[in-house]
Image (tube, helix red, strand yellow):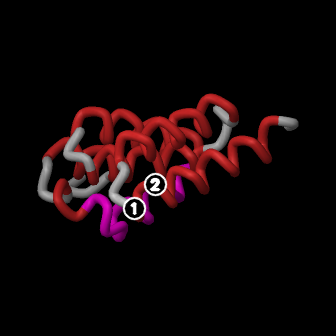
Amino acid sequence: LLNMPVARNQSTLASDFAQDGRLAESLRSQRNAVVLALESGRYLLQLAELYAGDGCVPSALTTLTLAIDRNPDWRARATTSDAFAAIRGNAEFRRVVGEGR
């Protein structure tokens, strides 16, 4: 519980870095947020979005799966998130979000 404010700060830093085009720092900060708040599917989803934006499709899909395992509602966000636009046609992405069943 004490880690939540620090995790939130790390996630905010990650967003700021991403907006500045500093993807390596963004990924590092978001991974820190995940470590500090493992139970938070939101931080996992945000990390998956960053991985997808960086073209790290396997990492994006693995992390997205973990986020959805924590909160199935993230499945719907993944289908509409601009961050996943480039991989929406990927068969594994469609399997993870439950499309084409």
The range drawn in magenta is 71-84
Residue underneath mark 1: 20
| Magenta stretch: includes residue 88 | no
The front one of 72 and 38 is 38
Q: Amino acid at mark 2?
A: Phe
Q: Position of residue 49 (x, y in %)?
A: 38, 52
Q: Is residue 98 left or right of residue 16?
A: left
Which quadrant holds residue 10? top right
Q: Quadrant of residue 38?
A: top right
Front-lying residue, 32 or 100: 32
Residue lying farthest to the top in this orientation: 35
Q: Is residue 70 above or below residue 45?
A: above
At a point 60% along the width and 56% down the height, the residue shown is 12
- Badge 1 marks a residue whose secondary structure is loop
* Residue farthest toward the right in the current orientation of the protein: 2
Q: Residue at x 23, y 52 (%)?
A: 94
Q: Is residue 12 left or right of residue 87?
A: right
Determine which of the numbered discs, if any, sits on residue 17 in the image.
2
